Image: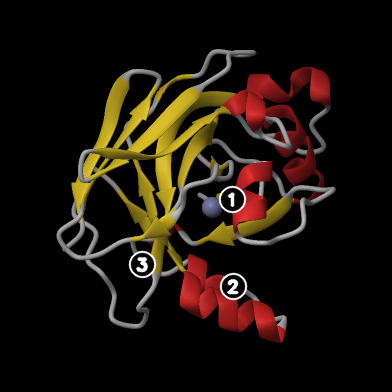
Amino acid sequence: MKIFCIGRNYIDHAKELQNPVPTLPLVFMKPASALLKNNAPFYHPDFSNDIHYELELVLKVGKNGKHISPAFAEQYIKEIAVGVDMTARDLQSELKKKGHPWEIAKGFDNSAIISEFRTYESSKNWHFSFHKNGSSVQEGQSKDMIFSFTDIICHLSKYFSLQQGDLIYTGTPAGVGPIKIGDRFEAFLEDEKLLDFFIK
Ligand code: ZN
């Protein structure tokens, strides 16, 4: 099982980090050991002083494919969830400055928080939102993505065989920010609460 992630897929988030808006999807990956399920607490690691949350829509691939064309792309999506791409922003900034890969800042243990999945419905505008200690911090909808689910599936499948069960974190809207021990986070897909966890 592979975990793909798309960076800078919402214009307002690219701007808040002073990153250029990409012309092709920006792809990175996390290992399977990054997954954190079942609303388990996230234990703050000691190698970073600036871990940021990024709430994202997450797709689950339903069948194997390669070189997928736009007309068929959505047929490869089986389910959808919300997930948090935990990011060690201090480590990432250092690595970006040196032009080095991001893996340790993005792929560390438990950095890919995932909710339960719901059945995917094609052509739907998916709304999602994130609450920190009871206040809304992020809100997004899939129609605001720079690269649509179809664009992402087509692009990824040029380079990688998509396999049943692979996950795709599709990027975060504006409002990312730091976590601290004791914070409670709740995430909603449409109006349904799918994540509720604490930072420990
Ligand atoms: Zn992200």
Mark 1, other Cα within 10 Å: few <14 / some 14–19 / many ≥20: some
What residue sits right under mark 2 in the picture? 102
Query: Can you tell me whether the CB of the residue at mark 3 lies under 8 Å from the nearest atom of ligand 1?
Result: no
What residue sits right under mark 3 in the picture? 109
Under circle 2, the secondary element is loop
Q: Residue at x 38, y 67 (%)?
A: 51
Along the line of sight, which residue is nearer the eye, 21 or 158?
A: 21
Res. 95 visible in picture: yes
Q: Position of residue 61 (x, y in %)?
A: 56, 33
Tell which circle, 2 or 3, labels the residue nearer the N-terminal end.
2
Mark 3, other Cα within 10 Å: few <14 / some 14–19 / many ≥20: some
Q: Is residue 6 left or right of residue 167?
A: right
What residue sits right under mark 1 in the picture? 4
Q: CA distance from mark 3 to mark 1?
A: 15 Å
Tell which circle, 3 or 1, labels the residue nearer the N-terminal end.
1
Q: Residue at x 48, y 66 (%)?
A: 107
Tell which circle, 1 or 2, labels the residue nearer the N-terminal end.
1
Q: Amino acid at mark 1?
A: Phe
Q: Residue at x 48, y 77 (%)?
A: 90
Q: Amino acid at mark 3?
A: Asp
Q: Position of residue 141 (x, y in %)?
A: 55, 27
